[in-house]
Amino acid sequence: MALVSIIIPTYNRVHLIGETLESIIAQSYKSWECLIVDDWSTDDTATLIADYIKKDARFQYHQRPVDRKKGANACRNYGFELSKGKYIKWFDSDDIMHPDFLEKQVQVLEKNKYLDFCICLANEFFDNLDSRNIFKANRTPKNDKLTSYLVKNHYFFTASPLWKKSLLRGKPLFDEDLTDSQETDFHFRMLSFDVKYEYTNDVLFSIRRGHSSITQDELNLVSSNFSRFKFFLKAFEIVEENEVDDKNLLKQYILYRLLGLFYFLNDTQNKKVMTKYYFRILKNIIKTKYSLKDKIAICIGFLLIIVSNKGHNLIKRAKVNIIEVIEN
């Protein structure tokens, strides 16, 4: 049986991770290793994991190397470097696998050798509620992969895919500089390659909601928006380099998102940090087709933001409505 490497980053989840690990033990597919990578928790996570390792040697406990940036992304990447499996499953330390999660996904990849990965659906749950809402998505998009992922509801979560390790080798994985949009960034980059995959209708894991310990204060909001900004900068370049159904339309969407984030960050972020992006944004405006009237307005708006943080109404001329909520 092919080995599946389950990689779980964790930080101060001793009160939750046990349920996650029990759901892994309960898998009908038994050929797995589980690498838990601790982001230097200050609770009793290490003690709890040690107990699980005593009971089941398929579990491993590692700590993020001190020379890697703090955060789940570095933990995920480090876990990948240590993994030995044919298949890779990144999972979160508070979510729950359904008993046939691994079995069904391995079957898809073993049956269809040409696939690089497969994707499943998920539902969400709250500890105090019995109802579970399924996250529906556009599983069979008519548009190209990049357009579909960004604006046609062709989304999936970090734990949704089971990846062939051979696809991931030698490629940049999770961007350790991002604190937000990291899974969007990673998936978007993977989709930019000539990948083959299947998105099934199976609901195979549950995402826990309502317990986040991260307060979305102003500092976190700035950090999150800066990460989104950096993602959209990369997305613009990826769209430039790839074949998409309507390249200019997608560039217009990305540019509008960039300008809105730039407006927020230029007012809240250190201006010296944002200065290095001025020319890059201006180049993206020039590279994107608009009517002459709209392009002049957008350029003036952008320059006003730089000088006085005004001009928000002018950059609205970049807006394009192409988002669709498609479920199938």
Image: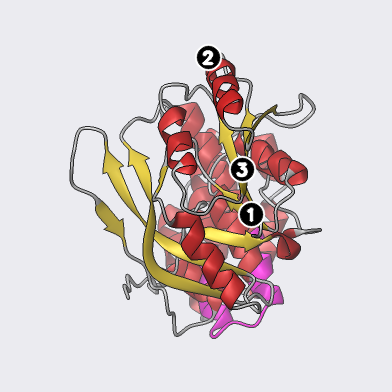
Going 60% across and 27% down the picture, which residue do you hit? Answer: 53
Residue that badge 2 annotates: 44
Q: Looking at the rendering, in which quadrant would you find the C terminus?
A: bottom left
Q: State the separation of the CA atoms marked 2 and 1.
A: 27 Å
Q: Which mark is residue 260?
A: none
Q: Main secondary structure of the magenta part?
A: helix
Placement of 74 over or under 256, stated as above or below: above
Circle 1: residue type: Ile
Q: Position of residue 232 (x, y in %)?
A: 58, 58
Q: Which residues are magenta?
A: 234-256
Query: Residues at badges 3 and 1 in contact (C-beta under 8 Å)?
Result: yes
Corner quadrant of residue 282: bottom right
- Residue 273 visible within the image: yes
Q: Please state if 153 lies on the left or on the right of 49 as rendered.
A: left
Of residues 113 and 303, the one drawn nearer to the viewer in this rendering:
113
- State how the image is colored: secondary structure
Q: Looking at the rendering, in which quadrant would you find the N terminus?
A: bottom right
Placement of 135 over or under 48, stated as above or below: below
Residue that badge 3 annotates: 7
Circle 2: residue type: Asp
Of residues 167 and 232, the one drawn nearer to the viewer in this rendering:
167
- Residue 318 visible within the image: no
Residue that badge 1 annotates: 88
Circle 3: residue type: Ile
Q: Position of residue 4 (x, y in %)?
A: 63, 53
